[in-house]
Image (cartoon, coloured by chain):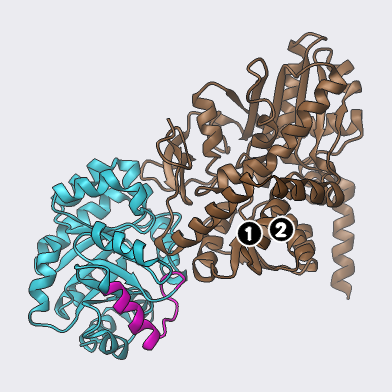
Amino acid sequence: MLETKIRAELQTKPILLMTHLVLGYPSFEENEKVIGAMAQAGVELVELQIPFSEPSADGPVIVNANAESLAKGTKVEQCFEFAAKMTGLYPKVGFLFMTYTNILFARGMDQFLERSLAAGLQGFIIPDLPIEESQDWRRNCHKAQMANVLIMTPTSTEARLKEIGQASTGLVYSVGRRGVTGLKTQFDLGLEAQIRRFKAATKLPLALGFGVKSPEDVAFLSGKADLAVIGSKLIELHQEAGVEAVGRFLGSLR
Amino acid sequence: MNQKPGYFGPYGGQFIPEILKATFDELVAVYQTARQDPSFWAEYLELMQNYSCRPTPVTFAGNLTQKLGGARIYIKREDLNHTGAHKANNVMGQGLLVKRMGKRRVIAETGAGQHGVATATMAAKFGFACTIYMGAVDVARQRPNVFWMEKLGATVVSVTQGSQTLKDAINEAFRDWAGNMDDTHYCMGTACGPHPFPEMVSWFQSIIGTEARVQIEKTAGKLPDRVFACVGGGSNAMGLFSGFLADKAVELVGVEAGGKGLETGHHAARLASKDGRLGIAQGYKTLFLQDEDGQMKETHSVAAGLDYVGVSPILAHLKDQGRVRFEAATDVEVMAAVELLVRNEGIIPALESSHALAQAFKEAPTLSKDQVILVNLSGRGDKDIFTIADAFGDQKWRKFIQEKARGYAGN
């Protein structure tokens, strides 16, 4: 189970890394190389984003990656096959699917869950599937021992944070600011206070994402959050400097 | 069964990112309070009367009635609404809610540009900052509307993501809202999207149906036998239909974009074709034109305002209940309807509204002379001159543009 894995890793490390990539962008071959570099650098969790034509919670870098992947013809079936291969190659890494509700819904939520389980995934992050719309899905994930990760935000009320803290499984994903993925986050006292608010609302490990871009950011989060999420930065780095640069960057983060 | 608020049968809901949850809670509360408050609707009516030419008339299309030789044809004149379409009804209502919420900025998506112009107009009147998101493809084909939005003080952002049309503009507006909800309201233009937009927009548009019901009884001496409205997102249809939903004898007909023909796949008929499939996107559940993986498809219509992958969850439910019949009109049929109305009645219809006309003209001859049909003319067409002149292949217009271009090139 995802939570057990995270807790075990946290015994020996001050902070864990969760990275992200968009499947089929720039290609599955490149995805495979990047995941190799991530595993080499000791990344504990990887979000595999299945591209969607309407990625409304994402910022420009990831939106563009979604569109280009789909333009190259990426199918959900390929994503399952690729994920199964990766979980087999890198058993120490925990893999999660990140995508939007319609990708699950189009295939049938139950079938999507079954296929993900069979492919060795450990859970899901679905940003447009809030608590109110996901009762059945969360119950079925729980039965299958798959995590369904919910998101805490600075605009969430205390009562809402508690609700999320209880309904999420595996970990809680939190964002330190308003807006979409990839934009700048201020790593300052305000963020520290937000993280304390999130921590107080859940017993689960807490990840912080959106705008984590440097070793300094990760150092700032160390001891405050349990996981740092690096998404858009890696896609940009891969575009500009290739797989080796991604590996070096990840190696420098802790 | 409405198991949760915001659901219409299996359609609707609120599939939103967590960052917007508190904003939606606030909007739902303000909307529900306004709906309970008679002084709000009174303020709204006064605004629409003084600023937007309401009530818009119902016109008897006598020449066409005679020509087609069947039912008596009446037209609800939303083309005479301020800014030239029904869009103002929704926008001015949301503007009043924005004032109640104390926000200072509005954002909106637009396809054809009508909703963008209406929102920019409202922002100018109420003193709000305004940003309009518009697909790059639409920016290119709707320059006159972009020109007016900018003159009205709005910032127009050309959206280069995805298919660069209406749905992509909606995504981009949501992204803006996710970062700026504290002082910004997203003024959604149609009866789609997450709760409360479908029912809130339909409520503001119900002003059309409320007026029309009284007017048609007075002028035709009876309720209509059939009521026609075009369906893009569905707000003008919801507006007119709402006046007659309780009158079981009145048949309601929604007309979608048949594009190049339903069999070609190049259309935007989510309800009238077999191609619409239940899905969840842009914050709500409805029938979408999508592939087997759940990726949204490209749609086609001569009318940019009907060129959308989803449809109002309320209309999807009314279809299931058998209350509304859905048809599709092709681009070719639509252009013929434009010509008929212009030549016989001296009214220039928007291409969107002409879908409703096309279907009404098709059915009128099959009805008897004592029967009455009512068509929603949701917008006027003279501002679509570039598109309509193109669609007619008008050579004199073409020459004029070429000369104009040479003139600009010379400077």
Q: Which chain is brown?
A: B
Specify the colour of chain A: cyan
The amino acid at mark 1 is Ala
The amino acid at mark 2 is Thr
Element on which disc 2 rests: helix
Q: Which residue is mark 2?
A: B119
Q: Is residue B109 shown above or below B317?
A: below
Element on which disc 1 rests: strand
Q: Chain of mark 1?
A: B
Q: Percent from the top left, x then y, of residue A98?
A: 30, 60
| B164 displayed left or right of A33 | right
Q: Which residue is mark 1?
A: B108
Task: Choose between A151 and A212: the one closer to the eye.
Answer: A151
Pointer 2 local density, CA inside 10 Å: few below 14, some 14–19, many at least 20: many
| B228 displayed left or right of A41 | right
Q: Percent from the top left, x then y, of residue B332?
A: 71, 32
Q: The N terminus of chain B lies in which quarter of the figure?
A: top left
Q: Percent from the top left, x then y, of residue A151?
A: 33, 64
Whether residue B341 appears in magenta in the rendering, the answer is: no
Q: What segment is highlighted magenta in the picture? A: A178-199
| B301 displayed left or right of B292 | right
Q: Chain of mark 2?
A: B
Q: Percent from the top left, x then y, of residue A65?
A: 40, 66
